[in-house]
Image (cartoon, grey):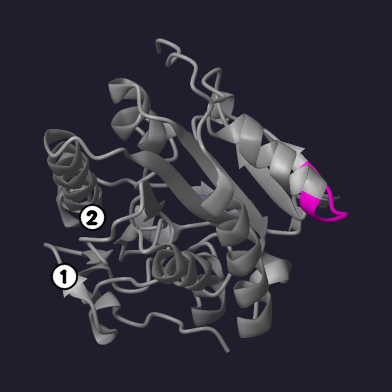
Amino acid sequence: MQHARQSPHARDGVIEKGMVRVTNRAGKSPFLLVCDHASNYLPPQLGTLGLKDADMLRHIAWDPGALPVALTMADMLDAALVEAGISRLAIDCNRPLDAPDLIPEVSETTLIPGNAALTDNDRAERIALSWRPFHDTIETLVEERMAARRETWLVSIHSFTPVYKGFARPWEIGIIHDDDERLSAPLIAALNAAERFDVGVNQPYSPADRVYFTLERHARSRGLPCAMIEIRNDEIRDQPGQQKWAELLVGIFSRLQPRQTKAVAV
Ligand SMILES: [Zn+2]
């Protein structure tokens, strides 16, 4: 059983503000990890959004397995990690504020009754609850690091469902990037060399699906190298799988240097 609706405050760690957590803030690694869909927690004021408990365990509510992988990587790399502590069904931190699925009324094929007919005030409350503190926290951290002239390579860790709308996805891992490939190209090459598995390049999503928002906002806007990692969630549903993928990625990350080409303008 996964940790349904576990409060993000239930685990040890530093609470920055609101429903955001920063782990290992002073980590020495150039990598700065983010986990937008870490939690399936719904704060009490939102009730159940009209969903069953079982729905809150599905990928529609969060990225199962992504947070344990990200935490293990943060520990092994000595990297800082920023995680959002509220379900993406309440508000999706990896979407621009004008995205139609910022507060989804339907996710995959499931209706989200508690997200129907929201007022402007309701939407503002959701943004203040999670989206704003999450992005403010990353902003502060990135600005601090840049002021200290620390290298910062932003990597987001996600998971995806093996079957989506009836389509079985063959990739065990996907690397999502735009036309700045400084980090993604060596990462993809190392993954292809490391194991025999299918590496999705801009699969199962691409920036055209507007899933690249957090990296666009904090890394691309500043010319920082970045990449988005998507791991198929059946690979990381238990601790041995999470450990295996964290170790594989950390092994690659430890040797990874972004290509020394200039940032591509957004
Ligand atoms: Zn995700």
Q: Nearer the viewer, residue 23 or 26?
A: 26
Say which amino acid is labelled 1.
Answer: Ile
Report the residue at 32% width, 39% height from top. Answer: 152
Residue 61 spot, x, y in % from top left: 49, 63
1 or 2: tag closer to the N-terminus: 1
- Which residue is under mark 2? 130
The C terminus lies in quadrant: top left
Report the residue at 49% width, 63% height from top. Answer: 62
Kindly report which numbered mark, 1 or 2, lies closer to the viewer in this rendering.
1
Report the residue at 36% width, 60% height from top. Answer: 114
Q: Is mark 2 within 8 Å of ligand 1?
A: no
Q: Nearer the viewer, residue 248 or 234?
A: 248
Q: Nearer the viewer, residue 46 or 63?
A: 63
Question: Is 78 in the magenta?
Answer: no
- In the drawing, what numbered circle is on residue 15? 1
The N terminus lies in quadrant: bottom right
Start-end of magenta stretch: 194-199
Extreme residue toward the right, this view: 196
Instruction: Say left or right for 231 vs 68.
Output: right
Element carrying mark 1 = strand
Instruction: Say left or right for 186 vs 12.
Output: right
Residue 116 spot, x, y in % from top left: 38, 50
Element carrying mark 2 = helix
How far apart, in angstroms, are the residues tagged by discs 1 and 2?
13 Å
